[in-house]
Image (tube, rainbow, N blue to C red):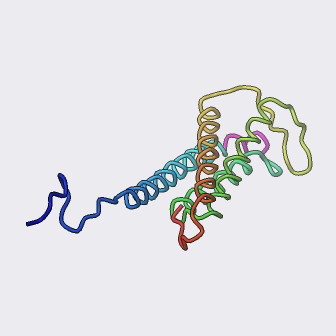
């Protein structure tokens, strides 16, 4: 006769499912972080790509703000794909630099009137409008998620040979 092992326990089951549950939660958490960060970076890229022609028209000759918008759109798209596909520490660092740098420039030129210097035009724009607010929120979210992912990556056990961040 098999001794009573409690409800729901099969023979040979030790009942120690905590490591498995923790691993599944950790993998699910990392996947959610990757998807959300990629989505935030996609919003950033989409808004910059859509607005670029209008900003370039303001200064058709020269480097132009529109070209800077296209560069930001390309960087955000690449960082988002890199995070989504790979999720490695370098991918998160790229996402952090892209989103955080873009947010810093957006806020800087919103509140400080910096004159043109070198090839860069004067980009002071002292108003908030829907697309600018949407971009700021997306960049802020991507920056936050990248920071969280990097902290989680740092806290992984050294005996783990592969990290699916």
Does 33 appear in magenta?
A: no
State the image coordinates of residue 3 (x, y, percent, origin top left). 14, 62
Residue positioned 64% across, 49% down in the render: 147
Does 57 appear in magenta?
A: yes
Residue positioned 51% across, 55% down in the render: 34
Residue positioned 55% across, 50% down in the render: 37
Considering only vertical position in the picture, is 118 above or below 86? above
State the image coordinates of residue 120 (x, y, percent, origin top left). 85, 47
Q: Nearer the viewer, residue 4 or 50?
A: 4
32 to the left or right of 90 = left
Residue positioned 74% across, 50% down in the render: 68
116 to the left or right of 32 = right
Residue sitting farthest toward the bottom? 161
Residue sitting farthest toward the top? 127
Secondary structure predominantly adopted by residues drawn in magenta: helix
State the image coordinates of residue 114 (x, y, percent, origin top left). 88, 36
Say which quarter of the image contains residue 4: bottom left
State the image coordinates of residue 16 (x, y, percent, origin top left). 34, 60
Say which quarter of the image contains residue 116: top right
Q: Nearer the viewer, residue 112 or 22?
A: 22
Instruction: Point out the image quarter for the C terminus.
Output: bottom right
Considering only vertical position in the picture, is 104 above or below 10? above
Instruction: Point out the image quarter for the N terminus.
Output: bottom left
* Number of on-image labels: 0
Q: Which residues are magenta?
A: 53-60
């Amino acid at each position: 006769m098999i001794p009573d092992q409690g409800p729901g326990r099969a023979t040979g089951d030790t009942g120690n499912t905590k490591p498995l549950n923790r691993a599944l939660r950790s993998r699910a958490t990392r996947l959610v972080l990757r998807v959300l960060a990629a989505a935030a970076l996609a919003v950033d890229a989409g808004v910059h790509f859509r607005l670029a022609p209008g900003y370039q028209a303001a200064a058709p000759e020269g480097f132009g703000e529109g070209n800077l918008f296209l560069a930001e759109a390309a960087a955000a798209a690449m960082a988002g794909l890199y995070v989504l596909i790979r999720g490695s520490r370098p991918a998160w660092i790229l996402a952090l630099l892209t989103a955080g740098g873009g947010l810093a420039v957006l806020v800087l030129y919103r509140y400080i009137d910096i004159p043109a210097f070198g090839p860069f035009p004067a980009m002071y724009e002292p108003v908030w409008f829907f697309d600018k607010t949407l971009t700021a929120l997306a960049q802020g979210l991507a920056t936050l998620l990248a920071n969280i992912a990097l902290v989680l990556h740092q806290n992984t056990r050294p005996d783990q040979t592969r990290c699916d961040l």
